Image: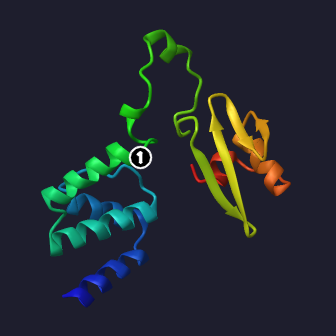
Amino acid sequence: MRDSLLSEIMALKALSAKELKEKYEALFNGERPASTYKVYLWRQIAYRMQEMAYGGLSEEAQGKIKELVQEYDPINNKTLRPEKSPQEKKRSTRDRRLPIPGTFLVKEYKGKAIQVKVLEKGFEYEGAIYKTLSKVAKVVTGSHWNGYVFFGL
């Protein structure tokens, strides 16, 4: 059964985005996918097929995942972020894709480890402060990059 499931999953790669979307909707009881990106659809379908064949995560495993997110994932865990008043929320211009201040973004570029510290307003790289991640990426690479793309955010 393992080899046939694997071959089924690998065969999905040859399908078009439209065919993958149809397969997704069939496996997820008519639910529309969050994205029509082929890689996303392929991964979601592959996971669902394995879940159906071998069973999903146990309640205990799901609970442990939630517990670990609460404790170790400051980006997605809103309880670690300080509560803001309604006025502060309106004034906030901070991009939601950014992790909380104090977090280090780490990337390897041409064999060199790049570490950037996220600040409340800006980014610190090699002792200098930059307003945007794009400026940091330009200093690192010598050419213009979208900072979010360069650092994988």
Q: Is residue 142 above or below residue 17?
A: above
Mark 1 closeness class: few <14, some 14–19, many ≥20 residues within 10 Å: some
Question: Could you tell me residue 83's position as x and y percent?
Answer: 41, 21
Q: Is residue 130 above or below residue 21?
A: above
The answer to which quarter of the image holds residue 107 is bottom right
Evaluate whether residue 144 shows in this view.
Answer: no
Considering depth in this image, is 144 or 69 the residue closer to the camera?
69
In the picture provided, is 93 more to the left or to the right than 51?
right
The answer to which quarter of the image holds residue 41 is bottom left
In the picture provided, is 119 more to the left or to the right than 3?
right
Q: How many marks?
A: 1
Colour logic: rainbow
Q: Residue at x 38, y 39 (%)?
A: 77
In the picture provided, is 114 more to the left or to the right than 91?
right
- Amino acid carrying mark 1 in the image: Asp
Q: Quadrant of the N terminus?
A: bottom left
In the picture provided, is 126 more to the left or to the right than 41?
right
Q: Which residue is mark 1?
A: 73
| Element at label 1 | loop
Q: Residue at x 21, y 55 (%)?
A: 62
Question: Could you tell me residue 32's position as x and y percent?
Answer: 29, 50
Question: Could you tell me residue 22's position as x and y percent?
Answer: 30, 62
Of all residues, the one furthest to the top in this rendering is 87
Of all residues, the one furthest to the right in this rendering is 142
Question: Could you tell me residue 2's position as x and y percent?
Answer: 23, 87
Evaluate whether residue 113 shows in this view.
Answer: yes
